[in-house]
Amino acid sequence: MTSPLQQKLRITGPVVVTANRLGDGAVIYRTDGGQWSTRLEQAAVVTTAAAATTLLAGATADDITAVGAYVAPVRQDADGALQPGNLREAIRHAGPTIALPGVI
Amino acid sequence: MYLYDDLDRTLVTERAAEFRDQVARRLSGELTEDEFKPLRLMNGIYLQLHAYMLRIAIPYGSLSSDQMRTLAHVARRYDRNYGHFTTRQNIQFNWIKLAELPDAMDDLARAGLHGMQTSGNCVRNITTDQWAGVAPDEIEDPRVWAEILRQHLTLHPEFSFLPRKFKIAVTAAAHDRAAIRVHDIGLRLHRNGAGEVGFEVVVGGGLGRTPFIGKTIKPFLPKRDVLSYVEAVLRTYNQFGRRDNIYKARIKILVHDLGAEAFAKEVDAEWQPIKDGPLALDPAVVAAVAGHFRYPGYETLSDNPPELAKARASDRRFGTWFANSVTNHKAPGYAIVTLSLKPEGGPPGDATAEQMDAIADLADRYSFGEIRVGHEQNLVLPHVAQRDLPAVWRALEALGLATPNIGLVSDIIACPGLDYCSLANTRSIPVAQELTRRFRDLDLAQSLGRLHINISGCINACGHHHVGHIGLLGVEKNGEEVFQVTIGGQADENAVLGTLIGPAVPYAQVADVVEDIVEAYLELRTRPDEIFLETVKRVGVEPFRERVYATR
């Protein structure tokens, strides 16, 4: 299987690097400072393939914190806030679109 | 119930201990994710969109009340208070933490539960009829054979790295409730012309991206030969199955490419040298395995006791539930009760920890401590005395488990879809929920008769859409969720793949489209008891296509 770093990135807009946290699988985003955050607004946003490749390389190297890092699209809403760029990322960010049955 | 012996208990306990060590090494950084991933998958642990998912096998769908309580405990202690029963007699927990998984595995192991072979390219959980052992139309209990296969194929080194995953289902009834013809191997116990009982062996069935109905390669296989023959099928597949292309790696592609006859010849060549060897089943071994199943000590009872007759006569709602959810049992005076996990607006197959605990209590009180899980994502109390049915119904009503929709339009099979699954392209649960609201009128549902809607959120077809009477397949098109609609599929002994009716429809229109199809059926059927499938067979898909696309 080709690793994410060997794949040529095609970037057509703003992107972030996201992954799942090793200990609990929570969705996390790579920050400007080379850390991880569960908050999308703290994610490092890049717009070129070169910058995305660099960001992804740093994320992938951190195998002990994050699993399965990849580049995901984002967009800015009218207020300038960062939003996930597609439905899959929106669900990863906000959780299932359904009420969970076991909530007590 | 099957009772574990010391060997079984040791295997499960040692596996949990081994996994604890693997998790510790992963969390410390000693193992990379590439090294750890195959190890976690061998224990049924996936990484989904928002969390780890743990899949636990429920072999041949049989659960004890204590095991159900353990599942409730895992849901409550380690997850978010619910679990999801799947189309392969497994349960999945969606929010489990890797760091807590070893403790969860220990708790499960103490109840004889595990995630072995619920993932990976091995022989997966062997499934069967959820009414096994109690169905009046079966010739013997198929779980004995599922158990013999399970014992032989668990951690079998030769079959731990097959070209792709491998699913086996067994039935012993005239009506196939285990969907054996859409499995890699389907085994059907039946009686031949000489009155002997043996297996019809069906291979190469499957859904997913390239669906096939399985082909019969052995119309009658003596029971003594089932292990050696299954071994020969697996060896043939292991040797010739494709490993160069994941989309062509399942046995169904091999059987299709070679042709069933040529495939059967290859299997036979593999089988002849081993058929009379150690794998030939000694009747004493079969009897020993069968002896590990404990059957209830049924009372001597009569059918239709006064308590039941009175409740049916005096309470219409009870009568509706009885007619829909209660089935004849082998033993006089007993009944099989199906618990609907498809309430209006609910995610199909989900049960809360409280429901699981309550079901366990009901099983202890009314069903000899036994519960079954069916591939249609409902549960079963398999041994309820008919006199107790009114009390069981009241208890189930209070738990939200008595929706009388078994086999009806709102008894929908659905995969977790994009709300959970990292493979999915679209959501499927909200589509199912909306359909259960549209068809909340149970009088209408009853008048429609048998009508199975199956929904998959991607081409992998975990929701069995190809064999739904109405099948819905979610695909992504230009960033939008759209659904392909098929009709006329069925998963039983007359298994057939559904036919696509036309272009995919937008997510927001799916429920309208299903309503259009149902309205067309009501107009097209020639008598009230002509079920949807019969109408489709008689008139074809064209009238339905016209109705759906006339205004779209």
Image: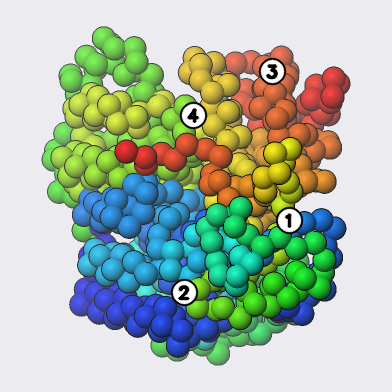
How crowded pointer 1 is (Cα within 10 Å; few <14, some 14-19, many 20+) is rated as: many
Q: Quadrant of the N terminus of chain B?
A: bottom left
Cα distance in 3D space between marks 2 and 1: 29 Å
Against B84, residue B124 (above or below) is below
How crowded pointer 2 is (Cα within 10 Å; few <14, some 14-19, many 20+) is rated as: many
Give yes or no for contact between labels 2 and 1 (Cβ–Cβ under 8 Å): no
Q: Are discs 1 and 3 located on one and the same chain?
A: no
Residue B519's label in the rendered image is: 3
Disc 4 marks which amino acid? Gly
- Determine whether the residue tagged by mark 2 lies in a helix, strand or loop: helix
Q: Nearer the viewer, mark 4 or mark 1?
A: 1
> Where does residue B57 sit, x and y in percent of width and height?
40, 62
Between residue A71 and residue B158, name the one nearer to us. Answer: A71
Q: Earlier in the sequence, mark 3 or mark 4?
A: 4
Against B542, residue A85 (above or below) is below
Colour convention: rainbow
Between residue B164 and residue B367, name the one nearer to us. Answer: B164
> Where does residue B153 sit, x and y in percent of width and height?
44, 76
Residue A73's label in the rendered image is: 1
Q: Earlier in the sequence, mark 2 or mark 4?
A: 2
> Where does residue B8 sit, x and y in percent of width and height?
27, 75
Cα distance in 3D space between marks 4 and 1: 32 Å
Disc 2 marks which amino acid? Arg
Residue marked by disc 2: B40
Residue B345's label in the rendered image is: 4
Disc 1 marks which amino acid? Pro
Cα distance in 3D space between marks 3 and 4: 21 Å
- Determine whether the residue tagged by mark 4 lies in a helix, strand or loop: loop
Is B179 left, or right, of B252 in this rendering?
A: left
Q: Are discs 4 and 1 located on one and the same chain?
A: no
